[in-house]
Image (spheres, rainbow, N blue to C red):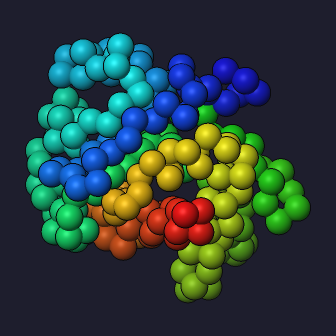
Amino acid sequence: EINGHVQYGRPMSAVPPLDAVLSEPMIFLSAAQRQVVQRYEHLAALADRLPCWVPARTVADALGFDHSGIELALRLAGRPYVWATEFENVHSLWRYGEPNILADGKRYACSEDYYQAQKTVPYDDGAWCARREGVMEVAVQAKLAADPALRTLLLATAPHPLLSLKADRVWGVDPRKGGDNLLARLWERLREELL
């Protein structure tokens, strides 16, 4: 760990390539996930193979989720998608030390801290909804600048769609209700700029 930022067991340049055509959705597990995967019987064998891409269904099975969310996400994406916890702003299970970011000339503890700090007081939902995507775009760009290893990971996901399956209908795809998947779309736009 350096300056509160979890460093990977292997350099991000070691991100294994994905096949050009995927038969199923895949989740990237970095070497930082070693302790997490060791806690789950169906993932423990991966501990010595990290970093690697893992079928989303394998992760769902290990965590006790059914595949209905994955099936919904596949219908919405139109083809197999990929994702990595490193692209999220909040981490509850998977390990990733969010980097401090510089956004709008000011330092923030992380991209989520910046995002939340942009909300007005008193809070106005209509005004916030109109600008939240632009705020998150600044946050994601600042995160990418603060952690250059994310560039390697992001580029490794091309040409596949990105999709965040979580209980959030704005920033992800809710496993039961669908969603806008805006966080993944922001990362896809950044990826296009880098290609």
The residue shown at (23%, 55%) is: 21
Along the line of sight, which residue is nearer the eye, 8 or 65?
A: 8
Q: Farthest residue to the right: give it.
A: 105
The quarter in which the C terminus is drawn is: bottom right
Q: Taking the image as drawn, is residue 2 in sight?
A: yes
The residue shown at (11%, 54%) is: 68
Residue 10 screen position, x and y as percent: 54, 22
Q: Taking the image as drawn, is residue 186 in sight?
A: no
29 relative to 112 in the view: left or right:
left
Residue 163 screen position, x and y as percent: 34, 59
Residue 35 screen position, x and y as percent: 41, 16
29 relative to 183 in the view: left or right:
left
Along the line of sight, which residue is nearer the eye, 130 or 142?
A: 142
Which quadrant of the view contains residue 193?
A: bottom right
The quarter in which the N terminus is drawn is: top right
The residue shown at (47%, 65%) is: 188
74 relative to 135 in the view: left or right:
left
Q: Quick check: 83 above or below 134?
A: above
